[in-house]
Image (cartoon, helix red, strand yellow):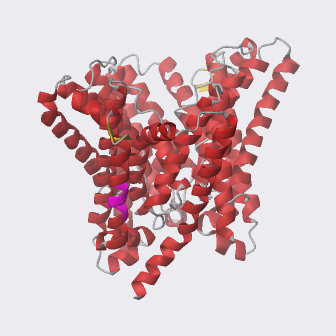
Amino acid sequence: MSHNSLLNRSRGAASLQPLVLLAIIVVMIAAQAILVPGSLTVEQLLIISRQASALGIITLGQAAVILVGGIDLSVGATVMMVNIFCISAMQGSDANGPVGLLVCLLIGLGIGAVNAFGVLFLKIAPFVMTLCTTTICEGICYVYTQGSPTGSAAPFIRALGTGRLFGIPYSTLIWLALAAAMWAVLRFTALGRRLYAVGGSPRAARLSGIANVRVVAGAYIFCALMSTVAGLILTGYHNIASLTLAGDYSMNSLAAALIGGNAIEGGRGGVWGVVLGSFFMMLLMAILTMMGISQVGKLIIQGCIILAVVAAQQLWKKD
Amino acid sequence: MKQLERIRRKFAATPQLSSVLTICGLLLMVFAAMCVYSESYRSTYNITNVLVQCVPLACVSLGQTLVIISGGIDLSVGSTISVCTAIAARLMGSDNPVQVFLGVVVVFAFAAVVGLVNGAGVNYLKVPPMITTLCTSTILEGVALWILPVAGGRINADFARVVYKKWDIISMPLIILIVLFLAMRYLLYRTRTGTSLYAIGRSRPIAASMGVKTTQASMKAYVLAGLCAAVTGLLLACRMRVGDPTCGANYGMDSIAATVIGGTSLAGGTGLLSGTVAGAFLIGMLSNVMNNLNVNQFYQYVMKGALLIAAMVVYSISDRLEVRRRES
């Protein structure tokens, strides 16, 4: 099967990176047990996984877009918009749930479609196009709330963000289920192969009969929908409408995807590296917070460690 | 006739030139419409102000353009600007001119070090530019807050006044921008370094096999981007007369947007400086126009995004027409 061997080569380059990352995560967990005695419990790791789930889900979407050679900076703005409109549509009652979910779904589809339209038909560079949608979405949120959002989440959304099944948070389960689904699609279906092909060489993909436009548009819409899911989870967890909830998700998801071994040029990468990348980011932040380091120290150490980790991965890759 | 032939050749050599002209046309149209519409807008005072307001973004975007042409990207310029204003506010408050001068030197030295670190991360550690500069950006955010926890400090008033001196429509920031632009232009189009930047942006292995010192050229691009960010930082510090550890936050993204609007491809290897300046002025003028029209601050976000998309659409249409013209 020649196409399989080709495919394995495009994955092979990245296949070691997740293992290195896994080793680093294990070292970090060990370091945490030593640095903050008594803090290492299963419960604490589950809490970190819950905190990582929103970033993790967004990063799955970001990874799909990066895989086809694009970039999506509007994920943070999507989270913000979902947060505000979900709370506003549901008015804190379960009865309005379906309407609220529909609104969120439309927001996700809309933002994804606009991004895809701009990139594919208006031929605007993805970086600039998604930056523009970010500005527009933020503007809409500001105009809609007049700068001071109010309200709280409906009970079932709150359950989504805080509930547990057999002790494992719902949001972690959703994250892992989505990751498994995406892995299966990338590994076993024609769609997965098309994603790699379009990212690897758009021209070759087009010449071999792949409808590039559909694949790329699908990736952007998938990414926006993932951000929508993450937005719902974050809304449930924080239980407030806020203009700052979205934080740095765009940049963090980008960093997590690249740490996980995805190549920014597209065409290379896998799902599990991305999952580990998101977990790594959150674990790092959690450990720094537990050690009681100030904001200044946190920013500096965080930057240094991420740089060191990626540098180590690059060294490993050369061997 | 000879003149015409020369202009035609120039167009053929730089395909983005027509896009730049489109952007400039757009700028002039916005400008003319505003002048007709508003009495206060066409005052010399306002026009000088508009030009001055666009200069900081234009300066940092020039450095960004060099990095993007060389096939990289620098997300850390925003934080570099913040740190520069923080350092300036700490060191340049005294009335002693020597100390003020030393402050300027320290700011530029710091920015050069930031550029070296970025360049080393990209070239020696082989970390992708986006990750390297994102990490240094995070680190610099921390450094800025460490130097200056809240906006404050002081900039020597005389120095600030000299930097913002105005003569009718010409002003000191504008002169700084023109000098910087000419220097960059010389570097990019007339020196070996400039040619190397284009070469490594197009294809690093090929450039290396042709004997280009790829590492050296790439390092230079990042250092220059840092220095340009320092110029912007000093301009902002002099405008505010204080330092602000978060004032650069938007400049990273805006500088990339200005560069791309100006016809430089994020893939590297192509691009031109005049387009970047036009792009920066377009972004700066749009916000000024909306302030002038009394558009609600919240609506400005929406308008800014929509207008940028509109500008990019005009650009891509002119690009496609250009391709069609070539093919026929």
Let me know if residue B193 is in the magenta part. Answer: no
Majority secondary structure of magenta residues: helix
What is the quadrant of residue A319 in the picture? bottom right
A88 lies above or below B74 = above
Let me know if residue A179 is in the magenta part. Answer: yes
Does residue A77 appear to the left or right of B81 in the view shown?
left
Residue at (42% x, 39% y) in the render? A50
Along the viewing direction, whichever of B190 and B308 lies nearer the viewer: B308
Along the viewing direction, whichever of A219 and A154 lies nearer the viewer: A154
What is the quadrant of residue A228 in the picture? top left
**Which part of the image, by quadrant, shows the N terminus of chain A?**
bottom left
Q: Position of residue B17 (x, y in %)?
A: 49, 56
Does residue B286 appear to the left or right of B196 in the view shown?
left
Let me know if residue B29 appears in the view: no
Q: Position of residue A119 (x, y in %)?
A: 34, 55
Residue at (71% x, 76% y) in the render? B209
Residue at (28% x, 28% y) in the render? A84
Q: Which residues are magenta?
A: A178-183
Q: Position of residue B211 (x, y in %)?
A: 75, 73
Along the viewing direction, whichever of A206 and B310 lies nearer the viewer: A206
Does residue B258 appear to the left or right of B145 in the view shown?
left
What is the quadrant of residue A143 in the picture? top left
Along the viewing direction, whichever of A162 and A52 lies nearer the viewer: A162
